[in-house]
Image: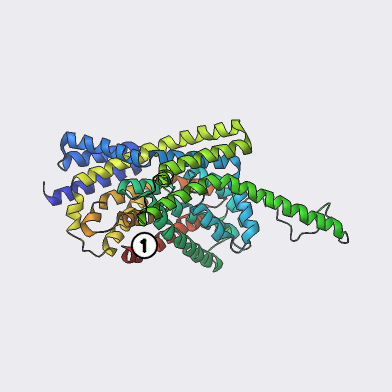
Amino acid sequence: MSDSLILVNTTFAIVATVLLIIRFRVDPVIALLLGASYLGLTAGLGVAGTIEAITKGFGDLMAEIGFLVVFGVLAGSLLRRSGAIERLVETLLRRVGPARMPYALSISVATVLQSIFLDVLVVIIAPLARGLGLRIGRNGTARMVTAMAIGMEVGVVMVVPGIATLALAGVLGVPLGTMLLLGLVVAVPTTVISVAVMQFVFRRGWWDEEKDELPAASAAEPPAGDGGASGAPLAGDAGARSVTRATATATSSVEQTRLLLLFAPVLAALGLIATGAMLDIAEVRIAPLSFVCNPVVALFLGLIGTILVTRHAVGRSAMDEALRDGFRDSGQILVLNGVGGSLALTIKNIGLGDILGQYFSANTAAPLLMVWLIAAILHVAVGSVSISAMTAAGILAPLAPVIGLDPVWIALAAGAGSLFAIHVTSNTFWLLQSLTGLSTRGTLKTFSGGVSVASVVAIAVIIPLSMVLG
């Protein structure tokens, strides 16, 4: 079959898949399977080859990320049930202060909270972000919601164990330790720079509370100072004030200890994965350490630890309910990511990489920009970060060996592109709006605007890094 016909069929399959999802409201799983089937049958794989690509693509990706997704979602559900998320936000506010709170929240959401299923994370963090916005000054709601959105979306496509991150690593065969280390190298500066840009924009007047926020009952303002509360110690009662300060300090210390214990298993698991990556780079082989640093084993150990601390914190009944919720959420994630793997392997098997490789030089900027652009276009149409990132990565993944490009950069570029122009086709968009009290216009400014800035910043960080690190 001619190269031009393969390109035409591939384009048609992708466009048709997008139209099925958007125009005809076909479930993404069915649309992706139809697209993969059409492409395999029309691009020369035949019946047997097409079925093999679909089933093997699904199975290979499940073997790569199945346990990781389940363990991550379960750990996130347990953390939600234990109240660890709310405690983390309150601790950050006390420790870093209002001015630096947007940065602290966005980095926390992008990194340590990525074990939580995205929609669950929105439900937990969005109301807290709105509440914190009322406490940090002018345009506080806009600044906090934007910071939360940037951290949440950057983390889900770049930071292990973000769901889309695991899927991208699986599709492209990127070692999870490598994805963890380089993902953090890209995600942290991307998040900080993007939040800084949006903070600047909002401070310069790109926010109108009357038009961008929905009318709501006024929230109670925090007290201006330490004194004046009903029942507070009298000004001259130095002994009472001393006891109050000592009690507050002791309470704060206990809360911080509890918070650390709740997050300790997940943080330890991520530490083991990072250790394994560094051992691989140093070519050090220690069998027992290699076993516990394996991502599946590390996250499993982290899940066991999270189960134990959650049971101690909230009891067995609440823990069991959290596990049931986690198993329910993980099922739909696994199926959707699996069929994304089917389409990716079909694209690989038809030889698209060799065809596209003729149009690129060894310069890594052009293919990475192409990955970013394809993912951005797909996301604008489809409205799904995971689907657009995985499809873009699958299309250009075969280019990696042709031009000598490490697949991790393709994964990160696809993730960056999939963040561009999140808008009304995204269910997360409406969920965020309903939980933050913003108008559609306000949600477009905070969520769509902020995450689009992060998309552009990310590719600007990725391209020079790929040239330096190879």
**Mark 1, secondary structure of its residue:** helix
* Residue 440 in view of the camera: no
Outermost residue to the left = 1
**In the displayed structure image, the side of residue 304 where residue 422 appears, left or right:** left
- Identify the residue at horizontal 51%, vertical 51% (top origin): 112
Residue type, label 1: Ile
- Identify the residue at horizontal 63%, vertical 39% (top origin): 313
Q: Quadrant of residue 306?
A: top right
Mark 1 closeness class: few <14, some 14–19, many ≥20 residues within 10 Å = many
* Residue 194 in view of the camera: yes
On the image, the x and y values in percent for residue 442 come to: 52, 56
| In the image, residue 145 above or below residue 45 | below
On the image, the x and y values in percent for residue 448 come to: 45, 55
- Identify the residue at horizontal 48%, vertical 43% (top origin): 117
Q: Quadrant of residue 457?
A: bottom left
In front here: 426 or 231? 231
Which residue was labeled with disc 1? 462
On the image, the x and y values in percent for residue 236 come to: 88, 61
**In the displayed structure image, the side of residue 17 where residue 7 appears, left or right:** left
On the image, the x and y values in percent for residue 161 come to: 44, 47
Outermost residue to the bottom = 204
| In the image, residue 92 above or below residue 17 | below
In front here: 322 or 431? 322
In front here: 215 or 194? 194
From the image, which quarter does the C terminus lie in?
bottom left
